[in-house]
Image (cartoon, rainbow, N blue to C red):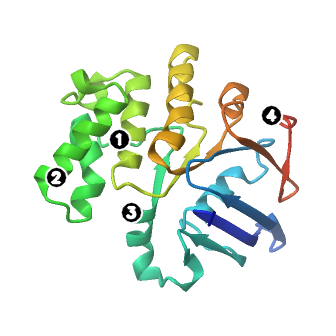
Amino acid sequence: MTPILEARGVTKVFTGGDGGEIRVLDGVDLQVARGEMVAVVGASGAGKSTLLQVLGALERPTAGEVVLDGQCVSMVPDEALAGLRNRGVGFVFQFHHLLREFTALENVMMPLRIAGVPISEARARGEALLARVGLTPRMHHRPGELSGGEQQRTAVARALAASPPLVLADEPSGNLDHANAESLHDLFASLASEMGVGLVVVTHNRALASRAQRILLLENGRLGDTRGEGLV
């Protein structure tokens, strides 16, 4: 099966304050298939968030290439990258980043409206996704009227709005209490297979990582297989 995401020799180097080289990623290789959930674990500061930014075309690699749904990201000009991200990648962060003046439904509709989808179609899609994450009774509430778990489930629905082939999640349950975190973990575990998306989750949470088909450890700039070692 052709992978939905492929990283080939991805390296990311930053320049430190003293002018020295900081090699955060060092020849990372990764393949993710449709319907597969992959967890990336590792110590704080190992470069996990940087990896997601490169995989999601928020940052360009210093070397190597990222191929998303058959398209080499390095071949996409800067002015077209935003469109690629909007169509091809859904993002879920530790902090939901919902627009507080809009309702849950309006937040989920936003990526579709930006892409030019008619409002009736965007509304129907938003309602269906909020129903899937259990928020039908709360869809007309603004973020300030939702619990932390409800806000994060809204963010998950928003990430799926444009039917992206890939969803990237960075510590998605890191700001939730145990009960809400477990509910979100269950949701993630079912979404990849149900909706046929590739899902890459960066997490320190053992319970969330255990729901993935593969757990990979990022250490010294490289990804390797692990049975759970390295979660901190």
- Does 79 sit left or right of 57 as displayed? left
**In the rendered structure, which disc, 4 or 1, sits on the residue that comes first in sequence?**
1
Judging by the rendered image, the residue that carries numbered circle 4 is 231
Per the model, the C-alpha gap separating discs 3 and 4 is 31 Å
Residue 196, position as x, y percentages in the image: 49, 49
Per the model, the C-alpha gap separating discs 2 and 4 is 42 Å
Per the model, the C-alpha gap separating discs 1 and 3 is 16 Å
- Does 17 sit left or right of 181 as displayed? right
The amino acid on which the numbered mark 2 sits, given as a three-letter code, is Glu
Q: Determine whether label 2 and label 1 are within 8 Å by CB.
A: no
Asked if residue 206 is positioned above or below residue 25 in the image, the reply reads above
The secondary element bearing badge 3 is classed as helix
Neighbour class for label 1 at 10 Å: few (<14), some, many (≥20)? many
Residue 214 seen in the current view: yes
Depth order, front residue of 218/16: 218
The numbered mark at residue 98 is 1
The secondary element bearing badge 1 is classed as loop
Per the model, the C-alpha gap separating discs 2 and 1 is 21 Å
The residue under the point 22% across, 21% down is 137
Per the model, the C-alpha gap separating discs 2 and 3 is 17 Å
Residue 45, position as x, y percentages in the image: 77, 48
The residue under the point 26% across, 35% down is 104
**Quadrant of the snapshot with the N terminus:** bottom right
Asked if residue 193 is positioned above or below residue 50 in the image, the reply reads above
**In the rendered structure, which disc, 2 or 1, sits on the residue that comes first in sequence?**
1
Judging by the rendered image, the residue that carries numbered circle 3 is 86
Foreground mark, 4 or 1, reads 4
**In the rendered structure, which disc, 2 or 4, sits on the residue that comes first in sequence?**
2
The secondary element bearing badge 2 is classed as helix
The amino acid on which the numbered mark 3 sits, given as a three-letter code, is Asn
Residue 13 seen in the current view: no
The secondary element bearing badge 4 is classed as loop
